Amino acid sequence: MLLAHDIPIPTFEELFEWPEIVPWVTKYVVIVILAAVIAFVFWFAAGRRQALVPKGVQSIGESLYQFIRNDIVVDVMGESKAALKYVPYLTTLFSFIFLCNVFEIIPPFFFPATSRLALPLVLALLTWFIFVIQGIVSQGVGHYFGGVLFPAGVPKPLYLLLTPIEFVSVFFVRPLTLMVRLFANLVAGHTIVTLMIVFTAANMDFADPIRLPIGVVSLAGGVAMFGFELFVSAIQAFVFTILTAVYIGESIHGH
Amino acid sequence: MNLLALILAAEEGAEGHAKEGINKILPQGFELFWGILMFVLLFLLLWKFAFPAIKKGLENRSATIEADLKRAEEAKLEAEELLADYRKQLAGAKEEAAKIIEEGRKTADELKKEILAKAEAEAGEIVEAGRRDVEGAVASAQAEMRRQIADLSVDLAGRILGRELDVTGQQQSIDEFVAELESLEAGK
């Protein structure tokens, strides 16, 4: 074993649980609040001064807003008024998830708030709640649940099989997969980044010609993981957002 | 027996540990609270204060760009019309110039012809006058010559005859003689 005996390997508690700073406030809470504040400051700054030729934060904000409007909402949900109404919600969702994710590689936090199950759970439940309500509002209770549970163009006896599957798939699997996908990706990323850093710390021994190269390689691996996790943060936020758009879009248009 | 107890104890311990593990993953109430509070708060604030400005900005920009494009299109059309106008005017001017030049040429031609005709006429007159002068001179020279011939003839005849002819008395016969000479000349 190359690891030095005196290097403390973080336990699960240290990786994912943080002592309360004050009661009910942990590192997770600080990050969630910071993410919300940063998102608000960013979007407020982006919309504050409307130059005809956008620069800096306005340019980034407008690009992101148009990306979500055109490439997520319009492409997935269509250009109807009911669909465009969701641009603000989906933009908020994307920014918030991305910022909560990206704290994984921001010092001194090095911890994605989304690697606590609470946040993916809350956001997945909100998506679930919204697409069910939107389905009922757009199509009416009977038509919406009928459309979901009894898909058209299927021989009647098959409903015996299909209806329970559809029921579980739409109303349980959807929110569950949304939650687990985000949560598990960030837990894994956080664990690997931590591992790389610990491994680097354990082997960066300038007196030991065998361990030093290993330390250097794992440091390089750690840096690469930082870049990769930045990418993962964006991708996971995007996936969560676009799936939410798909579900809400189905509720608006029917199956 | 001893072994069984050990296994049971181990299983119990593992179970307890597993339960502890899942508890650590499960969300805690305050985490749910903060998560939903901050997200919903963020959404409401952005919805109210940030996104309308961005949306309006984007819409304004596309409206401005559209208007600019339309204006540019109009300006282009106007310029094209103006150009066509100028071209037409230019063509008109060219035609006009050609006409003026043609007229000038015609006038010059006429003038030339007129001047030539006048010059010819004048030249003819001058020649005629000269001819007349010459004819007059010839006639008077002939008359003079005739007179002198007559005088010489009389003088000569007088000398031959030994007496002086009375020129004036003999004038008639002299004239007859000269006329005879002329007729002879003419008959020749």
Image (cartoon, coloured by chain):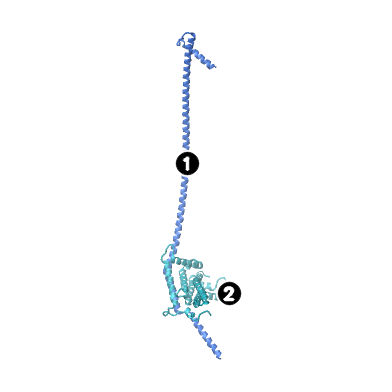
Query: Which residue type carries mark 2?
Result: Leu
Residue at the spot 55% in from the left edge and 91% down from the top edge:
B2
Q: Which of these two is toward me, A157 or A215?
A: A215
Can you tell which mark lies on residue A184?
A: none
Residue A144 at x, y = what percent? 51, 72
The residue that label 1 is drawn on is: B99
Query: Which residue type carries mark 1?
Result: Lys
Q: Chain of mark 1?
A: B
User: Label 1: how many residues lie within 10 Å, few (<14), some (14-19) or many (20+)?
Assistant: few
Mark 1 to mark 2: distance in Å?
95 Å
Q: Colour of chain B?
A: blue
Residue that protrudes farthest toward the bottom in the picture = B1
Q: Chain of mark 2?
A: A
The residue that label 2 is drawn on is: A158
Please say if B5 is above or below A47. Answer: below
Whether residue A180 is visible here, answered yes or no, is no
Which chain is rendered cyan in the image?
Answer: A
Residue that protrudes farthest toward the top in the picture = B162
